[in-house]
Amino acid sequence: SPHGTWIAWTLAGFLRDQGSAYQPLVSGRHQWDLRSAVELCDEAVRNHPSSAGAENCRLLAEAIRRPSLRLTTEQAVASEKPSLALVGATGLRSLHLRVVRADEEKLMEESAYNRPREFMSYLLSLKNKKKWSINLPDEGDFQPHAMEAALPPLPAGLWVLIASAEPEPSQNDSVLAFTPFWSTRISYVSKRNDDGSYDYFFLERETGLPLKGLKVENW
């Protein structure tokens, strides 16, 4: 009956909460609860599509199915060497990546004064260094999954990794993510002294050997 759609919605909400507790590195418990929630909702919508409970089920299933995307890189990677990014996604089977070179001052200016869509439009206008696509793990469980993506060797400078569900994204796309990072051979460690001053030690990023003859500007 139409009243049963409210029961389906309540059970699906419980399964949605259970599915959110899934810990893939610990056990497989709750992995398929989100899928079960969607199946309950879909059945309620099929059987009584005009009921209020079915409308709630429809909204809940849409929320569970909604794709999501996140990117993580190191703050700085070794210049002219391959590196890795961590890609986390839900509801996506493939992803389109690009790396673009950015000017630090311009990037800060655009991010400070523009709204998110305008800022993304600026990022997408930058010239691509490389574009490529990757396949993502998708078991049909509606759970978030993560994988490492290889980044190409890049010259020294500031770069932005952009990921999208579409091969040619626009600022209006709902599934877009980006992360800036530096490509550099320089790393450093700092030490706070008793008088409040700091000592900085500059090292070669890969070998850890000290760098000599550097001119450093502090602000």
Image: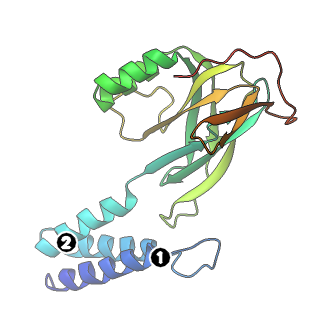
Residue at mark 1 to residue at mark 2: CA–CA distance: 25 Å
Query: Can residue 150 be seen here?
Result: no
Screen quadrant of the N terminus:
bottom left
Which mark, by number, is residue 21? Answer: 1
Query: Could you tell me which residue is drawn at 14 percent across and 81 percent down?
Result: 2
Q: Report the front residue among 211 and 8.
A: 211
- The three-letter amino acid code for the residue at tag 1 is Ala
Which residue is denoted by mark 2 in the rendering? 54
Residue at (87%, 32%) from the top-left corner?
209
The front one of 66 and 2 is 66
Q: Residue at x 25, y 82 (%)?
A: 10
Quadrant position of residue 124: top left
Image spot of residue 108 (x, y percent): 42, 23
Extreme-front residue of the structure: 195
Relative to 214, 172 lies left or right: left
Q: How is the image coloured?
A: rainbow
Amino acid type indicated by mark 2: Ala
- For residue 60, which numbered disc appears in the image? none
Q: Secondary structure at mark 2?
A: helix
Determine whether 136 is above or below 202 in the image: below
Task: Give the residue at x 57% y 44%.
Answer: 72
Q: Position of residue 81 (x, y in %)?
A: 79, 29
Q: Secondary structure at mark 1?
A: loop
Looking at the image, is 125 positioned above or below residue 118? above
Whichever of callouts 1 and 2 sits on the residue coming sooner in the sequence is 1
